[in-house]
């Protein structure tokens, strides 16, 4: 299968040069309709369509051994700044997802493609039949291994054809590309990004041995995660011991990278998953797919229509289900409600 190479560092400067041939026209059309001009104010908001606050809510049972039963719209209790809200939009946990598997192929993982291919294969097998999947790999560049598709045979072939990569780690640029281009809100589809990485971008202090790293600042990426409709599931792959010995990567970079991955998960309303070794990825991916099966879409129109630009806290609970708890975004900036039309 042919793949397209994209220079992630130049993405924000010239999107018209992302891809060639017929694929160029397709991607440029997506970028033209989906990529927004971003001011500092916009970066501190969640995108809200038609005054609707749209939450992706993970339902958790206090007993991890028990799977939560399917819930109905009236099982959810939503409050904003302590004021109960009326749920006006609801999608069951059975609703399909558009999934993007984002793979870090830099550093110590570059020589272990067999394990990465095998775990990616297992990810596709574990996904639900109605879920569509895209696979993206990155080093200092972003490579679309497979565009979004429900065709498992095409996905398996694309995984088999992943080539040995080269280059540094532009993680922040790669995730920004995925959020900006590949997972823009699709009609009747929910989106999730599963990113396998150690999180050590070459932009971190004393790390840029194999390149300068991402041009996207981490605060910008974090703000984008806060307002994205996609749920981000970071999978921290522990490469610290080998990288410190082989590449002399400072341990402080790993401390910071883990903290940043946790921030991305929290901003997205998810959690940070951990894989001590590449061999652990298969079981981690299977767990994420199971967790996706407990995610509901819950929306409401805020009773407070002041559009005051302030942060508004959100809590989600359940009626008559004391055994359950919810995980979702903790709030939004009301400025996002001014307009659903990009400036």
Image (spheres, rainbow, N blue to C red):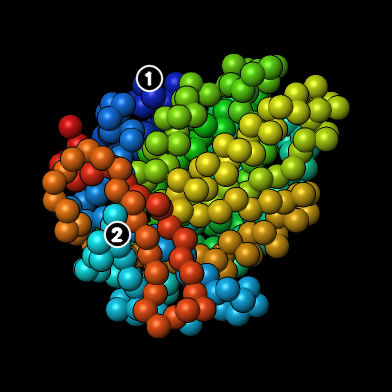
Q: Is 35 above or below relative to 205?
A: below
At horizontal 22% and vertical 38% (from top left) the residue drawn is 309
Disc 1 is placed on an element classified as: loop
> Pointer 2: residues within 10 angstroms few (<14), some, or many (20+)?
few
**What distance separates the C-alpha of mark 2 from that of mark 1?**
43 Å
Q: Quadrant of residue 27?
A: top left
At horizontal 49% and vertical 29% (from top left) the residue drawn is 218
x%, y% of residue 268?
Answer: 45, 49
| Apparent side of residue 232 relative to residue 84 in the rendered image (left or right) | right
Q: Mark 1 points at which residue?
A: 13
x%, y% of residue 248?
Answer: 80, 22
| Apparent side of residue 240 relative to residue 180 in the rendered image (left or right) | right
Given residues 2 and 26, the one toward you in this image is 26
> Pointer 1: residues within 10 angstroms few (<14), some, or many (20+)?
few
Any part of residue 55 in sight: yes
| Apparent side of residue 287 relative to residue 24 in the rendered image (left or right) | right
Q: Is 296 above or below relative to 2?
A: below
Q: Is 242 above or below relative to 322?
A: above
Q: Quadrant of residue 320?
A: bottom left
The quarter of the picture where the C terminus appears is top left
Closer to viewer: mark 2 or mark 1: 2
At horizontal 44% and vertical 80% (from top left) the residue drawn is 321
Q: Mark 2 points at which residue?
A: 82
């Amino acid at each position: 299968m042919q793949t397209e190479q994209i220079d992630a560092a130049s993405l924000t400067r010239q999107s018209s040069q992302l891809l060639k041939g017929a694929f160029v026209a397709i991607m440029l059309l997506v970028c033209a309709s989906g990529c927004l001009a971003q001011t500092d104010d916009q970066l501190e908001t969640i995108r809200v369509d038609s005054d609707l606050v749209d939450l992706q809510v993970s339902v958790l049972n206090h007993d991890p051994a028990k799977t939560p039963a399917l819930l109905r719209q009236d099982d959810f209790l939503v409050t904003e700044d302590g004021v109960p809200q009326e749920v006006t939009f609801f999608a069951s946990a059975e609703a399909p997802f558009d999934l993007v598997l984002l793979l870090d192929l830099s550093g110590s993982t570059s020589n272990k493609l067999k394990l990465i291919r095998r775990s990616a294969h297992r990810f596709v097998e574990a996904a639900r039949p109605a879920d569509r999947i895209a696979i993206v790999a990155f080093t200092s560049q972003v490579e679309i291994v497979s565009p979004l598709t429900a065709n498992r045979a095409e996905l398996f072939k694309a995984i088999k054809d992943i080539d040995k990569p080269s280059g540094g780690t532009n993680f922040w640029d790669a995730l920004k590309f995925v959020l900006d281009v590949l997972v823009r809100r699709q009609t009747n589809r929910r989106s999730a990004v599963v990113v396998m990485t150690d999180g050590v971008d070459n932009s971190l202090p004393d790390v840029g041995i194999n390149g300068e790293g991402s041009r996207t600042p981490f605060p910008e990426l974090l703000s984008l995660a806060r307002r994205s409709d996609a749920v981000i599931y970071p999978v921290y792959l522990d490469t610290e011991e080998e990288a410190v010995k082989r590449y002399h990567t400072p341990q402080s970079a790993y401390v910071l990278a883990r903290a940043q991955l946790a921030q991305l998960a929290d901003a997205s309303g998810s959690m940070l998953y951990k894989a001590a070794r590449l061999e652990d990825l298969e079981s981690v991916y299977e767990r994420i797919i199971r967790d996706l099966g407990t995610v509901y879409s819950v929306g409401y129109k805020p009773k407070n229509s002041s559009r005051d630009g302030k942060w508004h806290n959100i809590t989600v609970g359940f009626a008559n289900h004391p055994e359950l708890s919810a995980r979702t975004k903790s709030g939004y900036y009301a400025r996002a409600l001014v307009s659903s039309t990009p400036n």
